[in-house]
Amino acid sequence: MTDGNAAHVHGAGHHDGAPSWTTAARMLQDASPITVPEGASAMTVLIEWEPGDPGTPPHRHSGPAFGYVVEGAVRFEIEGEPERVVGAGGTFWEPGGDVIHYQDGNALTDARTRFVVTMLCAPGRPMLEPVGPAELAERAHLRAPRPAR
């Protein structure tokens, strides 16, 4: 959404024959195709990391997760993809399932980072499942090369 028009997204009004949401909505992310676990539940959370916070240790989600950076910058890395930094206004997603999510920490050392994530979860599974050192070592060949720091 842009220009504070979010309230119009669900409005029933029309402009030149088109629903008002078509002029108020802006595509932020297209994550397709996705696989949603049957009977999935969803949770949307606001994450706030203080400066330099490394974030959540390596983990996975049983279903896809979609994020939007509200403020700051997220260091984001999932298995098979290079580490990247997603700044305010940017989006990220992960497919869930077997894929390991290595990083989601604050990329900034001098400012807070806030992001919103919606996670879809298989029934009876936690939203986040930690990955231990043995599995990380076993799957090390699946991790993209990391930049030198």
Image: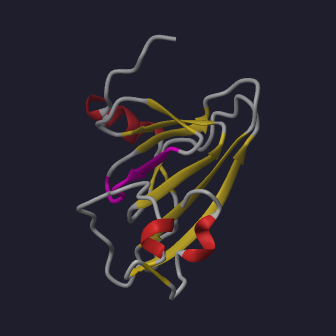
Task: Locate residue 102, reporting x and y percent.
Answer: 46, 39
State the image quarter where residue 113 is shown: top right
Q: Is residue 130 above or below residue 55?
A: below
Q: Which residues are magenta?
A: 90-98
* Residue 69 horizontal side relative to residue 32, left or right: right
Q: Residue at x 33, y 75 (%)?
A: 37
Q: Residue at x 47, y 74 (%)?
A: 21
Task: Locate residue 121, reporting x and y percent.
Answer: 44, 71
The residue lying toward the viewer, choosing from 51 and 127, is 51
Q: Is residue 12 above or below residue 121?
A: below
State the image quarter where residue 87 is shown: top right
* Residue 50 horizontal side relative to residue 68, left or right: right
The residue lying toward the viewer, choosing from 54 and 2, is 2
Look at the image and say whether residue 52 sits in the magenta stretch.
no
Look at the image and say whether residue 92 sits in the magenta stretch.
yes
Outermost residue toward the bottom? Answer: 12
Q: Residue at x 57, y 76 (%)?
A: 8
Query: Which colour assignment does the render follow?
Result: secondary structure
The residue lying toward the viewer, choosing from 103 and 72, is 72
State the image quarter where residue 88 is shown: top right
Which quadrant is the N terminus positioned in? bottom right
Task: Locate residue 61, reporting x and y percent.
Answer: 44, 59
Q: Is residue 15 above or below residue 68?
A: below
The tally of labels here is: 0
Task: Locate residue 57, reporting x and y percent.
Answer: 56, 41
